[in-house]
Amino acid sequence: MGPPGAGKGTQGELLAEHLGVPRLSTGDMLRDARANQTDLGRRAERYMDAGELVPDQVILGMVAEALDGPEPLEGFILDGFPRTIPQAEGLGELLEKRGTPLDAVVFLTVPEDELVRRLTGRSAQEHRTDDDPETVRRRIQVYRAETEPVIRSCLESGVRVVRADGVGSIDEIQRDLRGQLGL
Ligand code: AMP
């Protein structure tokens, strides 16, 4: 978990490779759905372009499907999900049904001016439609309002939360995370 631009995708991918498990990114799933112009992709478009969250029921349906694929998943890294309290509750139910509790929540912190710098720089390279300065500011606001409470509730619920400084080289941050996770 962490704000937009914290490096969740990069660090999540490295952890997933190290563990030999898939990384399930709701952002990537939505971008794929858009690229393929599926019903779900078309429904998600306007929320994504405005920097708003796609409705919880849409996201939960998508994650449930990803976890229920033809091959049983032995483990996975969730990236960019859950982002709201109802999503966290829905995830709790899905995991309980599977009998696979969460091992840990990884939380990356980055100061806000650095996030804005990273995200607006990224739009030039990756052409993400939601990386223009105004949308970036909105995505950070939404994160503070909707997602930070999820981190607080994780801390309160006693699930293991690993917190890492998201400023530094990719390798340094990965080393820190693996060290803290004992991997
Ligand atoms: P991301 O790549 O994780 O930054 O996600 C890009 C955009 O997809 C977000 O700004 C949201 O519009 C949407 N999105 C991704 N994951 C979620 C989620 N868990 N809940 C709601 N919207 C999401």
Image (cartoon, grey):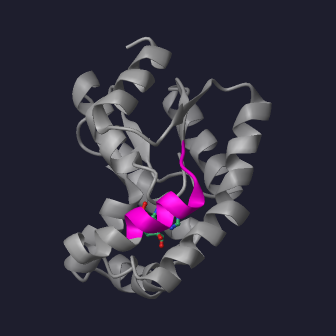
Q: Look at the picture and state if 180 lies above or below 56.
A: above
Q: Residue at x 52, y 36 (%)?
A: 165
Q: What x and y, as percent, mark residue 43?
A: 42, 84
Residue 24 or 182: which is nearer the viewer?
182
Question: Residue 42, can we see it?
Answer: yes
Residue 25 or 40: which is nearer the viewer?
25
Q: What x and y, as percent, mark residue 26?
A: 40, 58
Picture quarter containing residue 171? top left
In the image, the segment drawn in magenta is 109-119
Residue 59 or 71: which is nearer the viewer?
59
Picture quarter containing residue 132? bottom left
Question: Residue 68, can we see it?
Answer: no
Q: Look at the picture and state if 174 lies above or below 41.
A: above
Q: What x and y, as percent, mark residue 20?
A: 22, 26
Residue 54 left/right relative to 40: right
The kind of secondary structure the magenta stretch mainly shows is helix
Q: What x and y, as percent, mark residue 6?
A: 46, 51
Q: Is residue 45 magenta?
A: no
Q: Residue at x 70, y 37 (%)?
A: 154
Q: Is residue 112 magenta?
A: yes
Q: Residue at x 39, y 32 (%)?
A: 173
Residue that lies at the very extreme toward the top in this rendered image? 182
